[in-house]
Image (cartoon, helix red, strand yellow):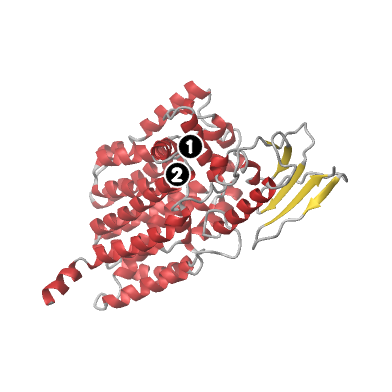
């Protein structure tokens, strides 16, 4: 009996890890078959179906510029292959996303174990599993989860100075999203000063390895220029479209907003406040190696905040930062009360509850918590209601807010029960219907007197105004 207990105790972290992941998978499986939500339908899911319907390829030429928006295509490329293999439907897409999320969890556990110990790896996973943003995006066809996965391995290989694997991971991340551009610069900065201060040498060779993935991105830009005629999609070009890129006041405001999302929202304020109080004195008791690892993670998070502040404000971008944030929290609480391990588990459980209580908010928050389920139910019911109207048929013209405007574009998106040709937001035609959803993006169309209101029941924080042209 004692021997068996010791054997179980030896693998305690692995057992808790697999149980936690199993509960997570059981919870998420029903969400795999849900319709496409917001940017899933507007960009990524739509792009995947386009590639499946035409030709799956990795180069920019295989996807319309309005869909790719000049972004590297690794995410939609891999998702398209997976989706085509497993059914060419939204369930296959979301299954791909869930697989990436599980790989991220396994990576957090493995990296935490290798850098510190199994307990730290487990605590980091448990904290990540409790984050509403992670739970929500874990079965969404959005690129931030894959980016988080690659970022974790980039930093791990950097800390281990495995430069070939670092190059591979960083190149994959660059081909997923341009957010990665800041990372080699930050890591190069950290390494340069660490080697200079503690080893009294200029790490020129190491810096060349760290910056080498830029060659891959430059190659992508050359291909993009040859195939699309531009290096950056105009809407995302800081020299043409994104004027806020150079506005210091806008950058500061967005930095503060992203900081709030990462450290304060969704119950992370408790772990942040307590963690900072404990971290400051604890940091100076750690070995230099641990200090270097933690400072690298902090630099990665700060770099993400600064880079994101020059971009559009989208909360889900902070998922990458949360994937590193949990390591610092796990490390601080994992080194507290060393003689009373049970108390460490209690504290981690309490921190988990602080976030889990906000898993589904009473207000709409896009892809940042599970409240998106309520919106999807509402959108699906509204689509069914419209399809059941006698005059809802092939060839009608409709003006609608996003995302309702795309719900009937392709029944594979998960809303329409039959494929109907609905002309949405045609400028030169008088629409049969005006549809204004809240939540949704609306352009304040001026309605004329020959329209009547069609009533549809409000659901939670979702409502709609439907105007039909009088017969």
Q: Position of residue 338 (x, y in %)?
A: 25, 74
455 lies above or below 348: above
Which residue is pictured at 53% across the width and 26% down the height? 230
**Residue assigned mark 1:** 48
The answer to whether 200 appears left or right of 96 in the picture is: left
Tally of marks: 2
Q: Is residue 11 visible?
A: yes
Dot 2, how many residues are within 10 Å of its Cα: few (below 14), some (14-19), or many (20+)? Answer: many
User: Picture quarter containing residue 324?
Assistant: bottom left
237 lies above or below 155: above
Residue at the far top: name it. Answer: 226
Whether label 2 touches label 1, CB < 8 Å: yes
Q: Position of residue 186 (x, y in %)?
A: 38, 46
Q: Is residue 200 visible?
A: no
259 lies above or below 284: above
11 lies above or below 227: below
**Residue assigned mark 2:** 93
The secondary structure type at the circle numbered 1 is helix
Q: Position of residue 135 (x, y in %)?
A: 45, 58
Which residue is pictured at 55% across the width and 50% down the height? 314
In-front residue for pair 89/214: 89
Specify which label sits upstream in the sequence, 2 or 1: 1
In-front residue for pair 370/325: 370
């Amino acid at each position: 009996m004692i021997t068996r207990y010791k054997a179980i105790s030896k693998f305690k972290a692995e057992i808790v890890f697999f149980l936690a992941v199993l509960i997570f998978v059981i919870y998420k499986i029903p969400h795999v078959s849900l319709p496409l939500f917001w940017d899933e339908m507007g960009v990524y899911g739509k792009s995947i179906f386009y590639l499946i319907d035409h030709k799956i390829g990795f180069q920019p030429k295989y996807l319309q510029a309005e869909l790719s928006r000049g972004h590297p295509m690794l995410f939609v490329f891999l998702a398209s292959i997976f989706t085509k293999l497993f059914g060419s439907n939204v369930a296959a897409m979301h299954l791909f996303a869930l697989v990436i999320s599980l790989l991220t969890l396994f990576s957090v556990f493995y990296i935490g174990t290798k850098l510190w110990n199994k307990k730290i790896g487990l605590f980091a996973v448990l904290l990540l599993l409790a984050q509403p943003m992670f739970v929500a995006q874990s079965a969404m066809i959005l690129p931030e989860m894959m980016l988080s996965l690659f970022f974790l391995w980039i930093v791990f290989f950097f800390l281990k100075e495995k430069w070939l694997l670092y190059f591979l991971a960083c190149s994959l991340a660059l081909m997923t999203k341009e957010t990665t551009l800041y990372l080699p610069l930050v890591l190069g900065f950290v390494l340069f000063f660490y080697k200079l201060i503690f080893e009294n040498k200029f790490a020129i060779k190491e810096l060349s390895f760290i910056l080498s993935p830029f060659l891959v991105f430059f190659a992508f830009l050359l291909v993009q220029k040859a195939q699309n005629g531009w290096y950056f999609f105009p809407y995302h070009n800081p020299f043409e479209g994104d004027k806020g890129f150079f506005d210091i006041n806008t950058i500061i405001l967005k930095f503060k907003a992203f900081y709030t999302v990462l450290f304060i929202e969704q119950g992370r304020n408790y772990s942040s406040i307590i963690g900072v109080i404990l971290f400051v004195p604890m940091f100076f008791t750690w070995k230099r190696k641990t200090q270097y690892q933690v400072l690298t993670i902090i630099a990665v998070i700060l770099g993400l905040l600064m880079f994101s502040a020059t971009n559009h404000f989208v909360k889900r971008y902070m998922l990458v930062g949360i994937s590193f944030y949990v390591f610092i929290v796990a490390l601080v609480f994992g080194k507290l009360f060393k003689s009373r391990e049970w108390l460490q588990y209690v504290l981690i459980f309490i921190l988990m509850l602080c976030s889990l209580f906000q898993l589904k908010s009473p207000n709409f928050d896009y892809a940042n918590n599970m409240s998106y389920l309520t919106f999807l139910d509402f959108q699906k019911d509204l689509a069914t209601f419209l399809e059941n109207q006698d005059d809802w048929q092939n060839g009608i013209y409709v003006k609608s807010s996003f995302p309702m405007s795309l719900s009937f574009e392709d029944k594979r998106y998960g809303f329409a029960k039959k494929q109907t040709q609905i002309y949405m937001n045609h400028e030169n035609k008088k629409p049969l219907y005006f549809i204004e959803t809240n939540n949704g993006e609306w352009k304040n169309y001026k309605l004329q007197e020959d329209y009547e209101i069609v009533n549809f029941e409000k659901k939670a924080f979702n409502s709609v105004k439907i105007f039909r042209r009088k017969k």
